[in-house]
Amino acid sequence: MSTRPAGCSTDAARVAQGVEASERIDGRWNASPFDSLMESLDPTRPIVVYVHGNQITASAARQRGLDVYRHLVGCAEDERPIQFVIFSWCSDKVPGLLRDYREKAARTRPVAWQLAWVFDHLPYGSHVGLLGYSYGARVSSGAAHLMAGGSLSGLRYATDCSDCRVKSVRAVFLAAAYDACWNSPRSYHGMALERIDSLLTTINPRDPAMRFYKWVPTEANPPALGGDGPKGLTREQASRVRLLPVANTVGKSHNLYDYLAAPGVMRMAWRRLAFADESLEPQVAGEDTPAEDLAVVVGE
């Protein structure tokens, strides 16, 4: 599904009119009404949503999404079916490297709202595995923050999503390009971990995009979450976060495919995104999701 025709609009009517959806059938993409596609999803099966990074065209979003899907199911440890959704947003390259990075960073704010809007159209009781790469992780974290009732510089999602259609969200972030402190309480994405039950994030301080991320903000020079890991979390928040160091395998690269090929990454991603440790049932009001213990993952 693509919100590219709506640009950076956060007007629900315009997004609804502009959103495009298509389905991969027999090796070809076939246009499908957005509402029909949403209704076809089964809430008792995991819905994995992939959010791409920066400088990706519409066609590249489809191809990379398919490649991510193939890597993910190639590491499956059981035969449970998943429903895989590629979320495509307006990230096409603009002239000037630093200008491009900063402009796209600004776009992730309204695009996070658009992703929250998509989540609000999923079947009631859905189990969502959220896979974000680079700025896609920034969009994903922002959407979770909005879904929990948070605000992004005054931008809120109109509907209270604290008990909305999505029952549970698990996230995997690869090379996350947003401030390392943003998920801490009272920070910019401070409510995201109220909506994300568990988070696995890669850590690679050698990634050039993580090293130079400090130049993206104009008034500070913060470290990137994908380089240093999250900062300022409470003990309870930290108990639901896994850190996966990949500097020795990915090295000085910000290439999606290097992260996908890193040993163990997609195997651990499958376990979380496919809810492989859980038998999914229709939503029960008030049911809690158990937290995981804090750990730095070096292999599973």
Image (cartoon, rainbow, N blue to C red):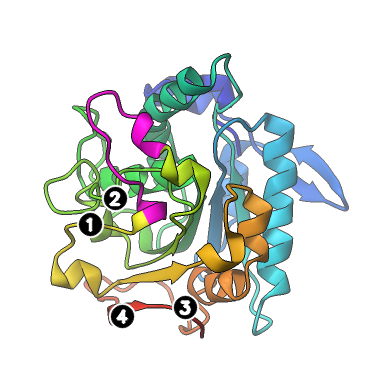
Residue 45 % position (x, y): 55, 70
The residue identified by callout 3 is 280
The residue identified by callout 2 is 180
The residue identified by callout 1 is 231
Q: Are the residues flagged by discs 4 and 3 in contact, CB closer than 8 Å?
A: no
Q: Is residue 5 above or below residue 41?
A: above
Q: CA distance from mark 2 to mark 3?
A: 32 Å
Depth check, front residue: 45 or 300: 300
Q: CA distance from mark 2 to mark 4?
A: 21 Å
Q: Which one is in front in this view, the residue at disc 4 or the one at disc 3? A: 4
Q: Is residue 89 above or below residue 200?
A: above
Q: CA distance from mark 4 to mark 1?
A: 18 Å
Q: Residue 292: which numbered mark, if any?
A: 4
Q: Is residue 46 visible?
A: no
Dot 3 or dot 1, earlier in sequence: 1
Q: Which one is in front in this view, the residue at disc 2 or the one at disc 3? A: 2
Which stretch appears magenta?
213-227
